[in-house]
């Protein structure tokens, strides 16, 4: 059976060893786990012109979308402090593309998984806010969390999961239609189910970090792939 194609909006990078110019990239580990879960990941160019934001055309042939991690959203998009010293890698084109893609997917029944920054994007799209800089960053942090729904929202076959986190921001006010299914011990939102015509969910952690040793992480992507396959 042909693998369902999963669209991943690329991230701008100032340098990459194999390139002579600035690049648009996706994490190799993220692509690997999508492939391991049965999907065919494809990186798309972010843009802010009307043609680049025409998702009906650009997602033709794609069955699902993964909203990936990356730098910070411009805090002005949710009423935060844009001059906070912790804010990094803000890019207006990236923000416009991410927000537009998330809005389109949630409105048009496109199976969607939001990871880290992707979760922040969805929360802002739904009218929520972010903590601009957490009192204690969750960078290089692994922890066990309980899934309130027993793992159903994410397709995880166990009520608890060990997660790998790398972020300094987090959900503050929850957006409309966002339902928390896991929190860290300090209260940080770690996973959500998202009300939408199609399947949609988000995780604050990075499944790509530990998927080779933890089948539960592959299961999260496999749920996206399964929903995408059913939509084709």
Image (cartoon, helix red, strand yellow):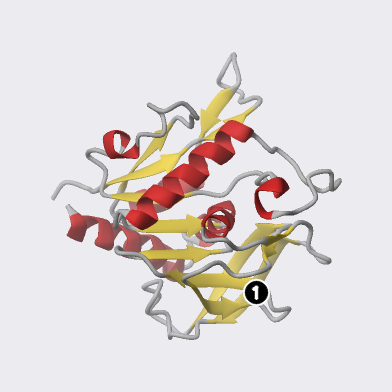
Residue 120 in the image, given as x and y percentages of width and height: 59, 57
93 left or right, relative to 226: right
Residue under the image location 41 percent in, 34 percent down:
53
In the displayed orientation, state which residue is furthest to the right. 85
Left or right: 32, with 99 as reference point: left
Task: Characterize the local packing of mark 1: few (<14), some (14-19) or many (20 or more) Cα atoms within 10 angstroms.
Answer: few
User: Of 109 and 213, which appears nearest the observer?
Assistant: 109
Residue 60 higher or lower than 222, as above or below: above
Give x and y (percent) for residue 225: 29, 57
84 shown above or below 156: above
Residue lying furthest top? 20
Q: Residue at x 70, y 38 (%)?
A: 89
At a point 52% along the width and 65% down the height, the residue shown is: 203
Q: Is residue 17 left or right of residue 199?
A: right
Q: Residue at x 51, y 46 (%)?
A: 99
Residue annotated with mark 1: 143
Q: Is residue 200 above or below residue 36?
A: below
Where is residue 22 drawn, in percent x and y?
60, 21
Between 213 and 173, which is closer to the camera in this rendering?
173
The picture quadrant where one finds residue 216 is bottom left
Q: Nearer the viewer, residue 190 or 166?
A: 190
What kind of element bears circle 1? strand
Total count of labels? 1
The percent position of residue 144, horizontal first and vertical second, equals 61, 78
Name the outermost residue toward the left.
Answer: 1
């Amino acid at each position: 059976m042909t693998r369902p194609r999963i669209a991943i909006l690329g991230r701008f990078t100032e340098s990459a060893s194999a390139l002579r110019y600035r690049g648009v990239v996706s994490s190799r580990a993220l692509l690997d786990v999508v492939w391991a879960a049965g999907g065919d990941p494809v990186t798309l160019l972010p843009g802010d012109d009307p043609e680049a934001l025409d998702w009906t055309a650009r997602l033709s042939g794609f069955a699902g979308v993964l909203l990936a991690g990356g730098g910070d959203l411009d805090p002005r998009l949710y009423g935060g402090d844009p001059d906070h010293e912790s804010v990094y890698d803000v890019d207006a084109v990236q923000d416009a593309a991410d927000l537009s893609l998330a809005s389109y997917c949630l409105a048009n029944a496109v199976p969607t998984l939001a990871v880290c920054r992707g979760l922040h994007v969805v929360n802002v799209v739904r009218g929520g806010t972010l903590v601009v800089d957490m009192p204690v960053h969750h960078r290089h942090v692994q922890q066990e969390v309980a899934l309130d729904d027993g793992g159903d929202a994410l397709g995880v076959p166990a009520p608890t999961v060990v997660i790998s986190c790398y972020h300094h921001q987090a959900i503050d006010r929850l957006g409309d239609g966002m339902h928390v299914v896991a929190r860290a011990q300090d209260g940080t939102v770690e996973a959500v189910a998202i009300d939408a015509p199609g399947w949609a969910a988000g995780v604050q952690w990075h499944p790509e970090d530990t998927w080779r040793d933890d089948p539960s992480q592959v299961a999260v992507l496999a749920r996206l792939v399964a929903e995408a396959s059913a939509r084709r």
